[in-house]
Amino acid sequence: MKVLFENLLFKNLIRHLKLIFKNLFFDNNEVLFLKYCNEKKFIKKKKIKIIF
Amino acid sequence: MAYYKTLISQNKFLDYEIIGLWPYFQRTVRKRFFFLEFVNEIYLYILDYIIFLKWKKLYKSIGITHIKRLNLSIFDRINFYTKNINLDFFFKKKNFFDFEINKIKIGDLLYDTYLRFRAQPTFFRKDKLFINKLIFKSNIVILKLEKLYKKYKFEAFYTSYSSYIQHGLPVRFFLKKKINVFSGINNSQYNKKLSHDDVSHAESYFKFKNISKNIRNNETFLSISENDLKLRFSDAEKKKNKMSYLSVNTYTSKEDEKFDVCLLNNLDGILFLQDFYDSPHDWGNLVFDDFYRWTVYTLHIIKKYNLRIAVKPHPNSWYISPDSILVYQRLKKKFSGIIWLDKDYPNKIIFKKIKFGISCTGSVLFELAFHGIKAISCGEHPGIDFNFTINAKSKSHYKSILLDISNMGLPEFSKNDLLIYNYLYRHMNMDAYDNIARKIELKNIDFSKSNSLVKYIEKISKYKNDFKN
């Protein structure tokens, strides 16, 4: 029981740490996407608003 | 995000200011000891904020500079609560599906949200703390949406889908405000205009029968549909063959050897289980409140009357819904006298052996009918008007079908009906407006991993280059 508990705790801890780190930083693909988007200019006119 | 990037780069959006809406105010909170649940909520709140910050940067890069979250400060919450103490914050009504706030009916949304975000296969009325919290949060969301609406006077609301209160509530709120609401990708569409009568992002299947009258003799459509089905039920390369939402191919025969065919020898039918947490009310009303109640009822009938029906779990659960696996294991233990097939057991083999198949609303119903096997359904599903299933109208009707299925014939439908239905469900262009996403076939990219963004860049760059030339 103790081993099971420790295993579960450890596995969950690792899983959550991975999740936090994954969301703290951008991976290579995301960096590429950001670079691609930032090359484009956005035309912004305050006229009518749309919500996503 | 790639979808929105494609959308807002279209000319018709260039003059608009776009406001982002971050609707994820509720993450999955499993039932635990009160203190542990409280700690978990705090952790999820922090995690959600970290995720929000990352996505905020990504959305900013595509031109959405303002993103609003659907939450209120603790002071606003207390203020709202004290001012509206008489409001219906708590669940008192007998029928949960009739629950509404500000005359917006959200019972079905709350039910599906409870299943997914409480990780419970069915609705537990005794879980009052969480249910009332969902209702209170729904009130807060409406208050926040009112504030945003007054501030920005939106012209349109675009959303990826409309399930659960996170997405469904804003959809219904803006529809009530008479704002144009559009949803995103489904099986056949890249966008869809929603209305009071049709609040779901899923295909408007109730229109299929009428549309089919005009296209039922169209040879091109029939041929596309036939080729699509040939590929779907063939041994073709895995990625090309499978349904977009399925994580596995149930029609490959590459690993057929490892499955024991003798298991099927004395069987009449198979019960195809569905994922318990996957918004059961997306297609409409069910005979049972949810898939779990339907499953348990069916298993009891099989056990009680010793029916020769085996059970096959939904293969997707192993990839997207680990909670379902635990429920399958529990049910397998409880109903150990029933044959439980492996989740990967190929339908190709099953269909050669059985006389009928049972699913509540699953896509396997169509597959059964296409192979000339009786399909028993138990609620509103996209093919309901095409009469290719024996659809139960009530629990007692369902029971009588199960007990008398061997004396029942196949419902009346033609191969043409099935081909037309498949075309409408998977191929017919019923988009509300012209879009680049369809032109670059955005649906073919699997966005579950970040490398999809690179594939997207390749596709959109190629499209732009071709357009220039």
Image (spheres, rainbow, N blue to C red):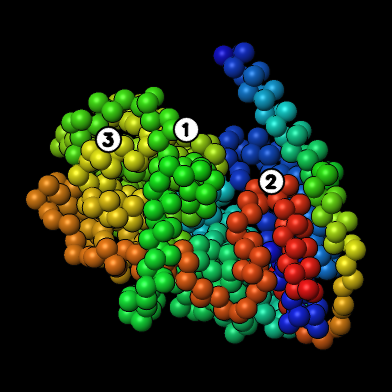
Is residue B156 placed above or below B273 in the rendered structure? Answer: below
Chain ID for label 2?
Answer: B
Residue lying furthest left:
B407
Chain ID for label 3?
Answer: B
In this view, the residue in front, B60 or B345, is B345
User: Can residue B281 be seen in this snapshot?
Assistant: no
Residue B80, x across and y down, in percent: 70, 68
Crowd class of label 2 (few under 14; some 14 to 19; many from 20; radius 10 Å): few
Crowd class of label 1 (few under 14; some 14 to 19; many from 20; radius 10 Å): few
SS state under label 2: loop
Is residue B13 placed above or below B45 in the rendered structure? Answer: below
Side of B264 where A9 appears, left or right: right
SS state under label 3: strand
In the image, what residue occupies the spot 67% across and 80% down? B156
Mark 1 on the same chain as mark 2: yes
Is residue B41 placed above or below A18 in the rendered structure? Answer: below
Q: Marks 3 and 2, how far apart in space?
A: 35 Å
The residue under label 2 is which amino acid type? Lys
In the image, what residue occupies the spot 32% across and 59% down? B379
Q: Name the residue carrying label 2.
A: B449
Residue B302, x across and y down, in percent: 21, 38
Residue B117, x across and y down, in percent: 57, 48
The C terminus of chain B sits in image quarter: bottom right
Q: Name the residue carrying label 3.
A: B310
Residue lying furthest front:
B469
Mark 1 on the same chain as mark 3: yes
Side of B156 where B214 appears, left or right: left
Indicate which disc residue B326 carries.
Answer: 1
